[in-house]
């Protein structure tokens, strides 16, 4: 045992079967990994699966990924490079027909919400987003929310920091499940998202469940599962309708 | 302003339209109300809607309700009377076809889980429950979980106290959304459900969202919304299939 | 030093000059005092000032006060006796013309809010109250809020437990100062009012300041000071207008 | 969705109507924005409203603002550039006649207090400030406090870190509303302003409400609303007096 | 091991040598002991040492002690029996000449402060106490504090709950060591004495050290040690003076 | 007292007798020491004992150690240099025959677990490690756990961050003592290892004890003591078996 | 679903195989169960296994157990009935030869420590206990600790509340593993065992692991596993020695 | 109000009379001040009082002070420049004869303890220090503690981080007052000194009071007051003795 190399080799075995088993693809958390490690893992996933989603990308890792893959893969860049989806040509994610709405209270909530957006897209869902609709100016909320309901979203993710009041307001107005996504926006007592999380857990509105502070990936995973569950039933309906059309 | 009576009259306006608007019926929280107040509210809801769900019923309120309604309504009793569903004859909840699975880690988690079960039933869902499947004896988990997946549940509520490890284990094994329901079981540091809540928020498994400690009603509301969303698509399918049968 | 009697005698010196100095009358906190102590203090204040406000009255103290004063003083009873204002005949509080609005999110917030209401009345303000306007059903908020603005209140106290979202919503809609009054409603993580307090401190709306959980007296004192400050300027105006009328 | 640009465009819609609606102008929080973003927002507000208040300005943003606006606008610089008020020539804030007192316990509390001072000035109030009057040397408090009362301030903001004792002492001595502004001064247990906040929430003096730690903008907004409420009544008086003068 | 009796016998070995070794007599904490246990321990200490100090006496234990010792020992009763000093006739505590001042902010702080007073008296000190001098009415503080300094106390214990501001104010005014004694007075955030403790730890005044919430015995022990240390030097002086007188 | 030098000299007296007395060698915590200090201490321990274990080595200290000792001692490097074991040639640690199993939930838990591994090796134990066996993919756990039991380990250290669920699962499956080692992996509420620690303390499985977050040295020390205790009995058996062989 | 009865039947399946699988017998936690439930479970375990350990027995459950089993089983009573071991005649626990030491800091720590003692005895270990050896009088510790080491205990459980300092002192003096058992003794900040737990987790002594506050059963389970692991090796030695004796 | 300069001028008024009033000289906290500010304040204090104590000196401030004062004042340097005492030639602090003992558990506690040492020296006390006497090796404590008692110290400051157990052990062994000084040593749960503070507040030994984490100045101030109180009595004795000698 003269080095850690032999340990590292046996680690980070990519869970290539996860998407099939759990409906959620493995996400590479770049934070806490060296740029070289992230590039290597991305390489392997691109080879074997054709796509990779990378979150919390530090600037130097972004540069290393750009150098490694710039011309050869397709890039979807979220939040100025903080979240990345890379794919081999022709390897677009499957379209499930799941429909996810995403609301953000303020501009600072966007990078976290985009983790959720990116994962839902990887899971095959359509995502509809509206921002800057926090409770300090409630009149801005109603129009985008109505549009979302018109589009018949299956679930709404509501990202908010500070007072975390928006998810409760939304859950009181709609009849689809709402996923509260507290963000680490805010300072002082209850800062760093603690106030937002607490407020969402204490909601007096029905139909709201939450994930941890800044856990956009977690919110996306649960929303994607919810939407894909409903979408599967709709696809059955559509197949039936199509068969019926053919029959005639 | 010589008494609080005039205030009380204008309060507790029953939100009779809530079920239509939000998909979740109003639940009467008996804790913190006098027995007489709860009886009166139940009376009014039974008259106007035909059904009422009452949670956290103290013993004296249970007695008062039994005296008031014993012969005239149908009773569904959960957790030795802690949760009650009363209904006028012929006022069964609608059957939506939503399917909810509920897992409980230990016996003490049952009363909280039954709040969720009762609300899901009120929301028209079918509920499948399995208990005593905590991580201290994992071998007991696999059989009931398989049965739940065979029954194609749309969502699984997992209630656990103490270490709160069960929801993470379950979310790693299935591909439907999982709602973690921490219960106030456990003492010492992280007792009263704080450890369970924290563990669920920190989950390393995808597809898990949580509600607050002991908030069985909250877990039921979000699970019911999820299941009913999928069920609506299935009902469309069924109606189409039926039409198609008629057509031929 | 053979007993504590000699200590007690030198204590609880009533601060009879407080109202003059601070604009806020001394309030007798009955909780933590024996019934006999509270009766004695009330007796002395009634003799010297003519009025007394007593808060957090335990049932046995209420009974003792009723026995001591039933026929001889005027009673204003709040929250079924939890807060009491007693006065000698002819000793009504002065009318300052200050105007205070009070909103409560749920029925359980009322006893705390009534502490604030009672103190504001003792300070000479007019109080306008509306209840059951929490964010789970926002549509109920707008009508009473408009009425309050029409009445030109100088300040609005907003009492809320659980998610504590209402004060932020209100502060985003009005241009008068808002005092957030968190109440110890709610259980689980952030229960006992901690979530409500945190949410209010983290508000993203302008013009909201808070007092501690269940501190209705504190909310009333600061709101009363605010309203009376504006009212003093209005009274100067009125005196001037009257003089002017006389002049002509 | 190949970049975040399309999201950003729809965001940060300046709430140009806020001042009219809420009596509080929108404040640009520079912290967490790039220098370029802050310059762009300031540009737009200067064009449309003529003034802009910018808080928590990082050094590089200060430099960028100086380069962008140095010769063309009027600068008011607080706390060595941490807070800035910029205005087009001739766009001074309106004078409402509201009067705000500000007390700071120690030198380190000044930058936070200056956020409040700057916002009150933007809201049209006159501000009177006295510093270094903490409870470790109480004799320094009395003279400036008397001067403030002589000037008939409508409200006093008291900023303090560490033990946070000063606001309670002040609220016990005056009869105007007091806004406690805890600052993140102090280390160890209760450090970072938690001790100061806790102490202010636990005050045993009447007439004190608080905002969150380091939330100078929040303290300024509520104090400005209080002072402007009283000032509006005084202006009515003054108009009446003037009319009366004209009449004669 | 068929019962716990054999364990109990070997326990609660009275530390009869403690006073000699540590300068602080053993105090019997009655809370958590049965009445019979407390009576038995008191019995043994009265026999062997002649005196016993008993704290946190529950009502039934008080009754049992009265029955056991009523006529045979001398009683000093503090806080209506919550703290008791019993002694055999002729067994008064030694007079060391140590001088301890005790200040209490409010009436509710008295029972805790009396634990400290009782222990200091057992340790042979003279105790001077003044109450109801909290910061909400600072003008009441100065007179008793001056009297205490005139009496040349060696140390001042300052008991306060809620905002805990009084010890900081006192430590800024005197030059003797101050012991802060936070009491569990106050509710809401920082209630139960946490706010008071935090405020005292964050003091910006020099010369203040603290003990835990409600730990009157701890405050008394450290104050008694401080006073007796100074008193020992004074007794040496007095002996010398006396010798000198004899010499002449 | 013109410098701190004279203090420093009397400090950091190496506890050369610790290994004999406590069974655990002194570990040099490099964090918080200058590179020069760590080199000097390592020098002295290498001279007197022949071996030294250094933990939490900062990069500059690693460089300084490499310069000081590169050619002259034997290096065992863990976690890319974060933990180091240096030894004089011929000074291998004694082989006790103690057997320790180590499981890690994720890659990020490895550096902390390697502190434990390194210390157990210094204490003479054999260590068997398996990684990446967290509860999000339970199927990966069973094979390595079976191998560990086949190897008859005396104790298992289980390192996990985030939800900290793995130690509970393991303790429910084996009959040897389990030491939970929470790691500071995870963000948001319960982040930094607090959730993992809490979950382990709240375990519902028997036979699990824990050490503090990231305290790999502490986990190694207790596991080494456990394993060496069992190994001592086995060595007695072996000596007896050998004697018996000789006898015949 | 008209009652909870059908749920209860499928619950509380006694894990009869646990002792074989995990080396720790199932313990019946009477707290939170009705007296009738506990009697029924005890009945079943006595029938199938011959022994049962019951912890946290409320007074009414104790009475019910006495009525149900008084004459027919053997009783071992700990802590005046708080913990009970019942056994059929002839069903003594197996003697493994494991040796466990237990130290308690104060009398109040005993009931919790007795849970550990009782479980270790059920697991077949010999237990040696010494009490009242807290750090306030360290001289009382050394004699019983020496006796414990002379008896060659395999592990020492150290139970302490308040400052929790004793386990660190002990772990610094011995070379066997130490299990810290914090108890909920102590009030004020860090009261209820939090201070003791924190202090043990922060230990600067090697070889100490901890369980949660008041978790005597948990401490017993891990200590029993440790001792039985060493004892198994000793029994192998003894069998060998015996064979050898027979051989000769 | 175009700059903050006019504010700064009125601030930081040096409290030149503090030493006379409170017995504690003003200490310049360099942390949070610019190097230039600290130099200027030091300059003024050296001119008016002849001495200055500066704490928490950042490296650049140290360099600036060295440049400003290198040849002209006398330097006493603690903790490699973290704490500094500067004095004009001939301005040594007065010798009061107060005697303070200081114990430190580990090397890392020294910089904090040296703040206390430096302040006690400024207050005229003699200081006796012993280090590296933590509870992990208790045998190292007894010799230096005996020396301290032989020297008849008036008070002992005990600095400790991590488990904070040392002050309780010391307070149980001596009869002088003990001041616990928790240091921010230690990581994980209870890290940063919280565990040490908690443990000290929960002490089961008599005669211990505490200051906040890392508050060496606070510990020095209270210890200096204690020691100087006793020393004043001794000086009276000495003066008397001297007079007596003269008389003869």
Image: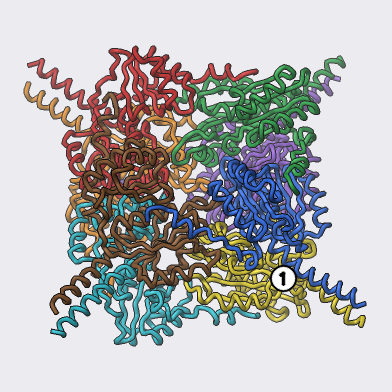
Chain colours: A orange, B red, C green, D purple, E blue, F cyan, G brown, H yellow
Q: Mark 1, residues whose alpha carbon is within 10 Å: few (<14), some, or many (≥20)? A: many
Task: Say above or below: C21 vs H185.
Answer: above
Task: Say above or below: B123 vs G26.
Answer: above
Residue G43 occupies quadrant: top left
Residue D148 occupies quadrant: top right
Q: Residue G239 at what x, y percent from top left? A: 19, 70
Of helix, strand and loop, which one carries label 1?
Answer: strand
Task: Say above or below: B78 vs H26.
Answer: above
Residue F142 occupies quadrant: bottom left
Going 21% across and 77% down the picture, which residue do you hit? Answer: F238
Going 78% across and 18% down the picture, which residue do you hit? Answer: C90
Chain of residue at mark 1: H
Q: Residue F116 at what x, y percent from top left? A: 33, 68
Quickly name the residue at label 1: H52
Quarter of the image for the C terminus of chain A: give it.
top left
Left or right? Give the position of A184 relative to A48.
Answer: right
Quarter of the image for the N terminus of chain A: give it.
bottom left
Q: Residue G60 at what x, y percent from top left? A: 41, 38
Left or right? Give the position of E209 relative to F200.
Answer: right
Going 51% across and 20% down the picture, which residue do you hit? Answer: B11
Frontmost residue, D127 versus B205 = B205
């Amino acid at each position: 045992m003269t080095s850690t190399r032999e340990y590292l080799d046996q680690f980070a075995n990519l869970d290539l079967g996860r998407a099939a088993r759990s409906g959620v693809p493995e996400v590479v958390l770049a934070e806490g990994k060296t740029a070289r490690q992230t590039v290597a893992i991305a390489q392997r996933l691109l080879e074997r699966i054709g796509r990779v989603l990378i979150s919390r990308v530090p600037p130097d890792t972004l540069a290393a990924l750009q150098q490694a893959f710039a011309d050869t893969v397709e890039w979807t860049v979220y939040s100025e490079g903080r979240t990345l989806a890379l794919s081999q040509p022709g390897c677009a994610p499957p379209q499930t027909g799941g429909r996810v709405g995403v609301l953000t209270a303020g501009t600072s909530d966007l990078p976290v919400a985009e983790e959720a957006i990116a994962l839902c897209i990887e899971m095959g869902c359509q995502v509809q987003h509206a921002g800057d609709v926090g409770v300090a100016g409630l009149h801005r909320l109603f129009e985008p929310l109505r549009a979302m309901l018109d589009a018949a979203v299956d679930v709404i993710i509501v990202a908010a920091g500070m007072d975390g009041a928006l998810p409760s307001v939304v859950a009181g107005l709609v009849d689809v499940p709402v996923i509260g996504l507290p963000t680490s926006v805010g300072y002082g007592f209850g800062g760093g998202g603690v106030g937002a999380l607490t407020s969402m857990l204490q909601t007096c509105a029905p139909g709201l469940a939450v994930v941890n502070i800044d856990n956009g990936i977690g919110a996306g995973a649960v929303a994607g599962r919810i939407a894909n569950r409903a979408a599967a039933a709709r696809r059955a309906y559509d197949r039936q309708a199509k068969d019926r059309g053919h029959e005639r």
